[in-house]
Amino acid sequence: MIKNIVFDMGKVLVGYDENRVCRQFMEDGESYRRVRAAVFYSQEWVLLDMGVISEEEGLRRMKSHLESEQEKQLAEECYHHWHEFCMWTIKEADTLVKDLKDTGYGIYLCSNAPLRLRTCYQDYLPAAECFDGILFSAEEKLLKPQKEIYERLFEKFGLKREECFFIDDQPINIEGAAACGMKGFCHRDENIANLREALKRGGIRA
């Protein structure tokens, strides 16, 4: 019997698009593409999600991928301000979370995210007050779909894996959860009505 709903954050409850911050500082073109790649598609971005390098070290290494001083400065602007522009609450997600909470489910978050998210997630996470536990990858120095991050989730919040249902936008993360005994659903279209239907098909009162 499912007693707990575990959500991913980005593209499930919170929309995300790195182009939003890039457009604040650049016009489209080659520099735009180089800066975006150096910041958001870099190994450093993954290492920040893992919590194994500092923000200062991450930025320094991101800038090292670029040649011109102008592009390095643009990368710095994008990096310092991405959390202000790139995220937004998905429509009707707050109602879904509140409905699940009112029905009696435990509500949890398991997200690949850097330490910066801990300081600002409440500005974007819908119905943040309803969450019984929040696990960000950087705090644990683990990353989905590693088995260890799911095991840490169960341990940290005293959850039984067979009583949890996981919602994520990446199939590989759902597969990782399944390998640990947690059922789940890959939700990729940001349509909360579709997610409600999927939950109902899974026997969850949403």
Image (spheres, rainbow, N blue to C red):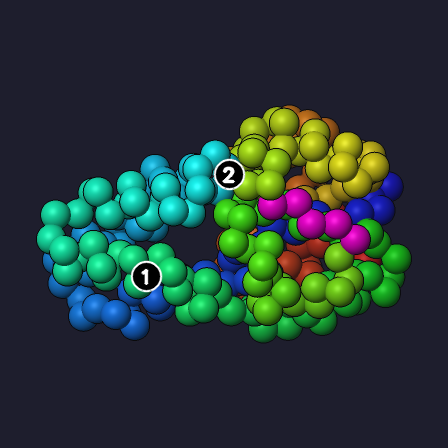
Instruction: Identify which residue, 16 or 189, lies in the foreground.
Output: 16
Image quarter hosting the C terminus: bottom right
* Identity of the residue drawn at 29% across and 41% down: 61
Q: Is residue 96 above or below residue 64?
A: below
* Relative side of 33 to 16, left or right: left
Relative height, residue 121 to residue 136 (above, below): below
Q: Name the residue under label 2.
A: 51
Q: Quadrant of residue 89?
A: bottom right
Q: What residue type is labelled 1?
A: Cys
Q: What stretch is highlighted in magenta?
A: 132-136
39 to the left or right of 203 = left
Quarter of the figure with residue 16: bottom left
Residue 156, placed above or below residue 77: above
Residue 153 visible, this orientation:
yes
Residue 46 placement (x, y as % from top left): 42, 40
Given residues 83 and 126, the one toward you in this image is 83
Could you tell me which residue is drawn at 70 percent across and 29 percent down? 151
User: Which quarter of the figure is the N terminus placed in?
Assistant: top right
Residue 206 visible in the snapshot: no
Tell me if mark 2 has few (under 14), some (14-19) or many (20+) residues whose alpha carbon lies within 10 angstroms of its own: many
Q: Under tag 1, what secondary structure?
A: helix
Residue located 60% across and 41% down the image: 139
> Residue type at mark 2?
Gly
Give the residue number, with chain letter if any, for mark 1: 78
Secondary-structure class at tag 2: loop
Q: Earlier in the sequence, mark 1 or mark 2?
A: 2
Left or right: residue 28 compared with residue 81: left
Q: Residue 162: within the magenta?
A: no
